Amino acid sequence: MDTIQITLPDGAKRQVPSGTTPAEIAQQISPGLAREALVARISPSNGGAAAGPAADGELVDLRRPLDHDVRLAILTPKDPDAIQVLRHSAAHLLAAAVLDLFPDVKLGIGPPIEHGFFYEFLREQPFTPEDLERIEKKMHELAAQDIPNERKFLPKPEALELYRKWNQGFKCELVEEKAIEPLVSFYTTGKFIDFCRGPHIPSTGRIKAFKLMNVAGAYWKGQEGNPQMQRIYAACFYTQAELDDYLHKLEEAKRRDHRRLGPELGLFSIEEAAGPGLIFWHPKGGLVRKLMEDWLRDELLRRGYDLDFTPHIMRLDLWRTSGHTNFYRDSMFGPVEVEKDDYQLKPMNCPGHILIYKSRLRSYRELPIRLAELGTVYRYERSGVLHGLLRVRGFTQDDAHIFCMPSQIEAEVEACVDFAFAVMKTFGFSDYVVELSDWDAAHPENYAGSKDDWARATRALETTLARMNVPFKRMEGEAAFYGPKIDIKLIDAIGRPWQLTTVQFDFNLPGRFGLEYVGEDGARHQPLMVHRALWGSVERFFGILIEHYAGAFPAWLAPVQAEILPVSGKFSEYGKKVAAELGAAGFRAHLDDRNEKLQAKIRDAQMQKVPYMLIVGGKEAEAGTVSVRHHSKGDLGPRPLAEFLTDLGKEVSLRSS
Ligand SMILES: [Zn+2]
Ligand SMILES: [Zn+2]
């Protein structure tokens, strides 16, 4: 019998008879590994150090006989690639269960997806929630039987015959189109058989933690006009704890969804009559926006920016000069004709700021010039990608452009990163990820700017981040054609990352617009230009804040800071007095003097996520106190009104969250 050589990930080599399976090798290594093993990865064995990284290679069944020298890794739940194999096998299990209960369904496809899998079926009646329950139960039954997933091969004509007899038209189509080898690969799970390249986990016993989530319609092959399939979607993990954690996060995300909270809390709406992707800020949202913008404008001035305002519509020619009519055309609204001249709704603020810079000759003494604008822009986003406040067609960027000399760029980058950190701290975020995007050095012809420009700017970004002790990830080849950048992603209260701050060099626009300054040497030079946005846009950041706080804004941002709740109509007068004192002290208070039970009023204030409820009755009126209830901390007991005012003042001025 032939002997083959197996190279393990640690470099160890084993001589085994040809035909040995990964499962057998796992067993030789250790029974524990054999128990944990799900699938194997093989790659060509080209000997020692020259071999590629371990993650390259092909995933194969543990039962696949090996017949030549290979590098072999046995994958367990610890390997990130293994989960998709488990999910794919779970999709087969779903199809097996559905066929068991509904033998007449026609099978479509069933791939693994992020967090789980789906399988699609053609069936006249829609699957009901009760059907899903039965299917899930059947899946658990079949899983518990630990049925092997076995690979079989059939000649293509036999494969087609099998599906024709079974009346599975979609599968016939797939075999016709996808089976390229003369032998067609199938997998069986008990009675269920599926045209499938695999690989799969050895048997169904390891599929334990899954949940059928929902049914969604989808055209066969995603093409309109094709039959409408029913896709059963499922979440699937190794353990119940992981599944529970995922389901909990989903619940949390739903609870925090800004698209629901926005209208519920009177913050914003999107009005179909006005068009999709356009935001209406309602009074309470408008108030939060004012507070956000006040903070930002004060910080901008404190940090040496100048505020400017530029028009929303400008000559189309300006966008030809900037190049946007070429590389950005698809994201722009169409031009508007005015007196035989074409005008363009602005998709960016940069050309406007450039015109201000260019309005007169600049001297090196003026640099850096930092022009900031809460600039409203309009972009044509396809209706399919619009999403609440996060993807819209009209929005206000917290935009700034910095024009500086090469010697100034490190200090400017540092100031931008410092400003971004101030935003995070102020708005209650502590976790973040930083990415530095560089060019693809092998293709300088695809980029604006010289090799020197790129090297200097990238070095400035790198050394600044290093000096500030900010860890970052380098993204080679990820930069835009016009310059390197750093991106900061926030991690919110439930661990989701949100792209926010960008600090972006531009080697393109200064040349296109012929920007200059007079240097110390009396000669004309071209300034460096940096685009930077901290929030990205007011709308997007507001959406993120709503989700981060689950609508319960900290006192400094809350549209109503205190709701005053008289226990009955008799104490309205004292309630009015408390409200007036809060108002006079500069707080946002609201008196709920509706003729409702106290419990109902508390519930409503709680629903509106007002930070403080001040309950007033006879005792309070007599003593000049308020009974304080906090939205999340609950009952805080009676307090003298003056003391409450002092404490609220402190909380607001510290912007505690
Ligand atoms: Zn499959
Ligand atoms: Zn810009």
Image (cartoon, rainbow, N blue to C red):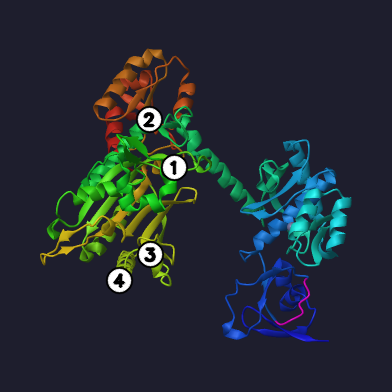
Q: Image point 87% across, 60% down: which residue?
A: 158
**Which residue extends farthest right?**
165
Does dot 3 land on a helix, a strand or a loop?
loop
How dense is the environment of label 4, judged by Cα within 10 Å: few (below 14), some, or many (20 and up)? few
Whole-angstrom CA distance, mark 2 to mark 3, is 45 Å
Q: Are marks 2 and 3 in contact (CB under 8 Å)?
A: no
Q: Is residue 478 left or right of residue 626?
A: right
Does dot 1 land on a helix, a strand or a loop?
loop
Q: Amino acid at mark 1?
A: Tyr
Whole-angstrom CA distance, mark 4 to mark 3, is 12 Å
Depth check, mark 4 against mark 3: the one in front is 3
Q: Which mark is residue 380?
A: 1
Residue on which the image places disc 2: 284
Q: Is residue 55 left or right of residue 501?
A: right
Mark 3 and mark 1 lie on one chain; the one further toward the N terminus is 1
168 falls in the magenta region: no
How dense is the environment of label 1, judged by Cα within 10 Å: few (below 14), some, or many (20 and up)? some
Q: In this rendering, does residue 467 appear at all?
A: no
Q: Which mark is residue 452?
A: 4
The response on whether ligand 2 sits within 8 Å of label 2 is no
Magenta stretch: dominant secondary structure: loop
Q: Are marks 2 and 1 in contact (CB under 8 Å)?
A: no
Does dot 2 land on a helix, a strand or a loop?
helix
Q: Position of residue 48 (x, y in %)?
A: 60, 85
Residue on which the image places disc 3: 447
Mark 4 and mark 1 lie on one chain; the one further toward the N terminus is 1
